[in-house]
Image: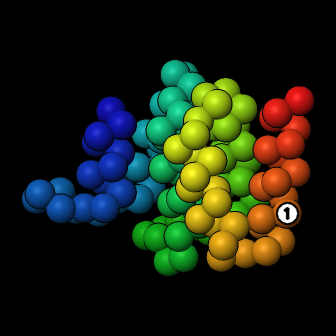
Amino acid sequence: MFNLAVVLRDGGDGVAQNSARAVELYEYLIEELDDIQAMVHLGFLLLKEGAERLERSVVRAFELFGRAIWEGRSGGTTCQLVFLMICSFSFAIACFSLLLQCMC
């Protein structure tokens, strides 16, 4: 199901892009299976400007990244957050705060 969400998110291989359906699949994977990869991918999709019929939500993306770190102790997620920190100083401050909370 995760792979289908990725294909729908990007389109290709004869499959039309459908970000709305990809979000539905990611949300299902997150809520029903606590899927860390889905949290990270949905977080990045929510940060993407102009994603098909999808409202950009930095707050929701941050919540998903935080949950992925908290539940998965995901080093990969932490690295992806560092990339985001490079792009936004205020986001960096919020990320460091969350990371400090997770370490306690």
Residue 47: where, in percent of width, then height?
A: 59, 66
Q: Quadrant of the N terminus?
A: top left
Q: With respect to residue 101, does 96 lie above or below? A: below
Q: Nearer the viewer, residue 23 or 102?
A: 102
Relative placement, left or right, of 2 versus 87 is left
Question: Looking at numbered disc 1 in the image, what kind of residue is underneath it?
Answer: Ile
How many discs appear? 1
Specify the farthest residue to the left: 14
Name above or below for residue 97 compared with residue 25: below
**Secondary structure beneath label 1:** helix
The outermost residue toward the top is 33
Residue at 54%, 76% (x, y): give it.
Answer: 49
Residue 63 makes an appearance in the image:
yes
Percent of width and height locating residue 19: 41, 59
Where residue 12 sits in the image (x, y, percent)?
A: 18, 62
Residue plotted at (89% across, 29% down): 104
Q: Which residue is more in the foreground, 30 or 97?
A: 97
Q: Residues within 10 Å of mark 1 (few under 14, many from 20)?
A: few
- Given residues 100 and 56, the one toward you in this image is 100
Q: Position of residue 8 (x, y in %)?
A: 30, 53
**Which color scheme is applied?**
rainbow
Is 9 situated left or right of 46 in this image?
left
* Residue 27 can be seen, yes or no: no
Near-viewer residue (49 or 88): 88
Q: Residue at x 27, y 51 (%)?
A: 7
Q: Residue at x 52, y 44 (%)?
A: 76
Residue denoted by label 1: 93
